[in-house]
Image (spheres, rainbow, N blue to C red):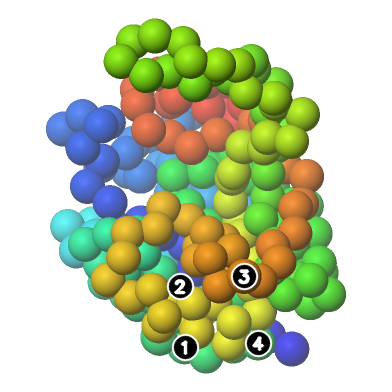
Amino acid sequence: MNVNAIITAGGTSSRFGSTNKLLEKINGKEVIKYTVEAFLSSKIDKIIICANISIMDKLKEMFGKESKVEIIEGGSTRQESVYNGLRHEKCDYVLIHDGARPVISTELINICIEMVKDYCALSVMTKTIDTIKEVEHGRIIKTIDRTKLYNTQTPQGFKYDLILDAHKKFEGKNYTDDAGMVEDMGLPVYVVDGSYRNIKITTQNDIELAKIYLS
């Protein structure tokens, strides 16, 4: 059974600044390079990077010699990028990961590879540790019970046919994660314990934190 990885790299990094955050260097290495190298060291069979057209040439320079890596054009949304990746090549199972999560460990990737074969749909998550408030018009409405709350991370893993069907069903929508589509189909998605270090690079402050974790 082959397991592919789809790595999303199609964003414009509008909240990050004037440069693409995936090409930002942390301790001398690009963000996307940390991400892809973690998957290259894992038991994954193929890595499909769904990239913004503006950085495709740069990514081909970085990974052109890696036989496991293919670089294709992403879409205008994250959902479109993943759908492009799914249609690019059929497999048995697929892990979907944010290119902007460079602190992902190979160990966690391998855990997802093994677990998805049993559970068909899963998401790496961490338990919410902050007190969460519901706010309306600048006023606190209520405190939400956090005992059942989790923060979503990636990778998320799926049986290929299942997640492809979900993308076909919800094509043109704007889901921020793939597990949400499976949930809305009424199918179960299971939790894999993640790491609080598995941060997503969104702002310059995240770069400073990632420097510590990746040093």
| Quarter occupied by the N terminus | bottom right
Q: Position of residue 169 (x, y in %)?
A: 41, 80
Q: Nearer the viewer, residue 93 or 172?
A: 172
Residue of label 3: 186
Separation of disc 2 and disc 1 at Cα?
9 Å
Q: Position of residue 51 (x, y in %)?
A: 30, 63
Q: Residues within 10 Å of mark 1 (few under 14, many from 20)?
A: few
Q: Earlier in the sequence, mark 4 or mark 2?
A: 2
Residue of label 1: 89
Q: Is residue 212 above or below residue 187?
A: above
Callout 2: SS: strand
Callout 1: SS: loop
Which residue: 74% across, 36% down?
A: 148
Image check: 56 left or right of 205? left
Q: Residue furthest front?
A: 141
Label pair 4/2, CB-CB below 8 angstroms: no
Q: Position of residue 160 (x, y in %)?
A: 59, 83
Label pair 2/3, CB-CB below 8 angstroms: no
Image check: 206 left or right of 143? left
Q: Nearer the viewer, mark 4 or mark 2?
A: 4
Q: Quadrant of residue 188?
A: bottom right
Callout 3: SS: loop
Separation of disc 4 and disc 2 at Cα?
15 Å
* Image label count: 4
Which residue: 66% across, 80% down?
A: 159
**Which circle marks residue 92 in the picture?**
4
Q: Residues within 10 Å of mark 4 (few under 14, many from 20)?
A: few
Q: Earlier in the sequence, mark 4 or mark 3?
A: 4
